[in-house]
Amino acid sequence: MEETRQQRTCAAQGGLRVLVVVDDPSQRKEIARQLEGAGYAVETAQGAAQALEKSEGFRPQIVLADGHRDGMDGVALCRALRRQKNARAPHFVLLTSDDGEDALAQAFDAGVDDIIAKPVTPRVLLARLQGGARLIRLQMELEGARREQAEHARLMQQIQQAHKMQAIGKLTGGIAHNFNNHLAAILGYAELAQEMFPDVGDGQLAEFLQCIHQAGSEARNLVVSLRAFSQGGGDGRETTLKGAMLADVVGLLRPILSASIQLGTDFDEDIPLVLVNEEQVHQMVMNLCINAREAINGSGEIRLALKRAQGVRADCSSCHEWLGGEYLELSVRDTGKGMAADTIERVFDPFYSTKEVGQGTGLGLSIVHGIMHGYGGHVLVESAPGEGSNFRLLFPLGRGVPDGKAGEMRREGR
């Protein structure tokens, strides 16, 4: 009756995986029967080689092994299991009839967690394994708590980033709207003055008016960029994202890159259909490649790639949302100086720049953020100091292609 009550306790706390490594078949079978009756999942092995092989797939949480066996004793088996890579070290219980001081010290030095003297009754064996099971469950609970804490911290970071970008987006949109109204007046009056006074003076007035108009036009382009960040980039999708589209950007990039920088491409042909706004894609690639040029600051390589990305599992570098699945990936990789982790954390913030004052607006990557999230996509940044950077733009599949459009585009060969 006492043994049955103990077995029920083990069953309530059991479900753990136990690997029994005993040479004697009848003893091995009996121990397995006792453990299964107590609620454990049991696998058996006769020798060390079989035990190591089965542990790969079974991944035992407890190993119960003979102290002295043919070929390899339990202590050596424990050492071998501890050396296995990509596997959690099991709670190792050694059955032995050698209770000498040297033997016990050697066993514990090898990583044995518990030693049970033979012969042992089923009741004692179950009680000792129950003690090991409690330790394992406690470890699992602690790991679960750590995972929950890490997930909570990740979600809080994601929420804070989303609130920050939303607030900055609203502020930026408001500034852009009001600024654009003033620019419209500046450009309008400059154009009127150019038309009304084309021949006044010695030509200096016309030159001054042209400078005013040019500065206003550049400021208007900045407003367009601010709006692209604040509003996202999912509107006006008309073109399939493919290598032919990006070839045009490559043609525009070559003249602005020094001869010491190589520009390479790797565009797959067999890629899923994703509709994008061509101008926005050009803008993102140009921004990323110009940043890559500045990061290289000498000789190096920039490589553009377009491919299907499968099995993606990561945190978005700009919004910190967890993403997984299949995407169409457009990447820009460079061999420049790379970035530290704290820089990557801030690199998508509007007006943040690692360049000298006056050498950049700090909006390039913010625009990439706005456009990509307008498409429901994400950005992954892989970089480290001295190892270059890789910006991976991930476009979700099935978005931007209306019902029936995909088949039509395939028939037309687009």
Image (tube, rainbow, N blue to C red):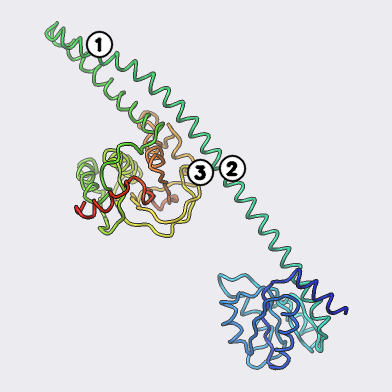
Would residue 132 be visible to someone looking at this image? yes
Task: Give the structural element (helix, strand or loop) at label 1.
Answer: helix
Task: Give the structural element (helix, strand or loop) at label 2.
Answer: helix
**Quarter location, residue 71:** bottom right
Marks 2 and 1, the one that precedes in the sequence: 2
Q: Residue 271 vs residue 42: left or right?
A: left
Name the residue beneath numbered marker 2.
156
Marks 3 and 1, the one that precedes in the sequence: 1
Q: Disc 2 to disc 1, how far (Cα)?
A: 49 Å
- Residue 319's spot in the image, x, y percent? 48, 42
Residues packed near mark 3 inside 10 Å, few (<14), some (14 to 19) or many (20 plus):
few
Name the residue beneath numbered marker 1.
189
Amino acid under disc 2: Met
Residue at the image point whose x is 44% and y is 39% from the top: 348
Viewer-nearest residue: 289 or 21: 21
Total count of labels: 3
- Residue 268's spot in the image, x, y percent? 27, 58
Residue 321 higher or lower than 367, as above or below? below
Disc 3 and disc 1 in contact, CB within 8 angstroms: no
- Residue 155's spot in the image, x, y percent? 57, 45
Q: Residue 172 vs residue 141: left or right?
A: left
Task: Give the structural element (helix, strand or loop) at label 3.
Answer: helix
Q: Residue 100 vs residue 140: left or right?
A: right
Marks 3 and 2, the one that precedes in the sequence: 2
Give me the disc on residue 122: none
Mark whose residue sits in front, 3 or 2: 2
Residue 231 higher or lower than 16, as above or below? above
Residue at the image point whose x is 46% and y is 46% from the top: 317
Give me the disc on residue 342: 3
Q: Disc 3 to disc 1, how far (Cα)?
A: 46 Å
Residues packed near mark 2 inside 10 Å, few (<14), some (14 to 19) or many (20 plus):
few
